[in-house]
Image (cartoon, grey):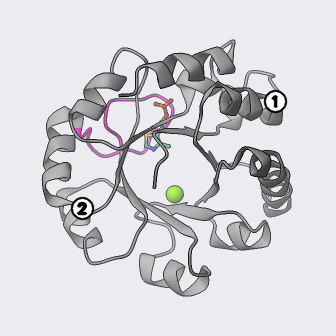
Amino acid sequence: MNAPLYLVTDEGLLHGKDLYSTVEAAVKGGVTMVQLREKESSTRDFIERAIRLKALLTPYHVPLIINDRVDVALAADADGVHVGQSDMPYSRVKRLLPKGKIIGLSVETREQVIEANEWDVTYIAASPVFSTTTKTNTIVEWGLDGLQWIRSVSRHPLVAIGGIHPDNVASIFRAGADSVAVISAIIGADDPGKAARELIRLIP
Ligand code: TZP
Ligand code: MG
């Protein structure tokens, strides 16, 4: 997986901006993977958005990942799914998704990092790496020490998510992450394309 700048969507942070033009501007700015994260919408709206985003992203060769929902990922022929610790368990995701699809897994504890070494996930996401107001039900922040620890024990590509902005991007890569996943730093920016360009410039 080579996707150093991973954009996660959040309807609530668009502040009136259009989802598709925001994502497209961010991709033109350098975003290398996109996750559609819909916590409020109906299944039908979720699928419709996924199909539209997939069509938008395909010409850019940027994979589309669906948050939480394997059924939506299958219905939209997305490139993969991202699950957390209370979503569908890894073994079931693996059975349902065709071979070659991306499976991302959030890890919130050391035990979960070790457990994931038994599984063929595409990446693990240290969640949250720093404090964030975008997601409320988080446990503890991994911090840079936590990232370094994960890097030393995990065999999987490592994504960092939570509270990431231009001032801390470089330190996250120095701690061993392969990718940064951001919501507010891009979705909430007045100029999402410029925000993505600024972040990509800071990635080694
Ligand atoms: N999972 C862990 S932290 C988080 C998610 C979805 C929110 C990240 O948002 P932001 O705005 O980049 O801190
Ligand atoms: Mg989830």
Q: Nearer the viewer, mark 2 or mark 1?
A: 1
Q: Residue at x 67, y 33 (%)?
A: 27
**Residue 143 screen position, x and y as percent:** 22, 34
101 up-or-down from 64: above or below: below
- Which of the numbered marks, if any, corresponds to residue 21? 1
**Residue 84 screen position, x and y as percent:** 45, 60
Is the N terminus in the top left, top right, bottom left or bottom right quadrant?
A: bottom left
Please provide the residue range marked out in magenta. 128-142
Q: Are marks 2 and 1 in contact (CB under 8 Å)?
A: no
Q: Is residue 104 left or right of residue 114?
A: right
Q: Is residue 45 left or right of residue 163?
A: right
Is the C terminus in the top left, top right, bottom left or bottom right quadrant?
A: top left
- Which of the numbered marks, if any, corresponds to residue 113? 2
Amino acid tagged 1: Ser
> On the image, which quarter does residue 66 sit in?
bottom right
Q: Secondary structure at mark 1?
A: helix
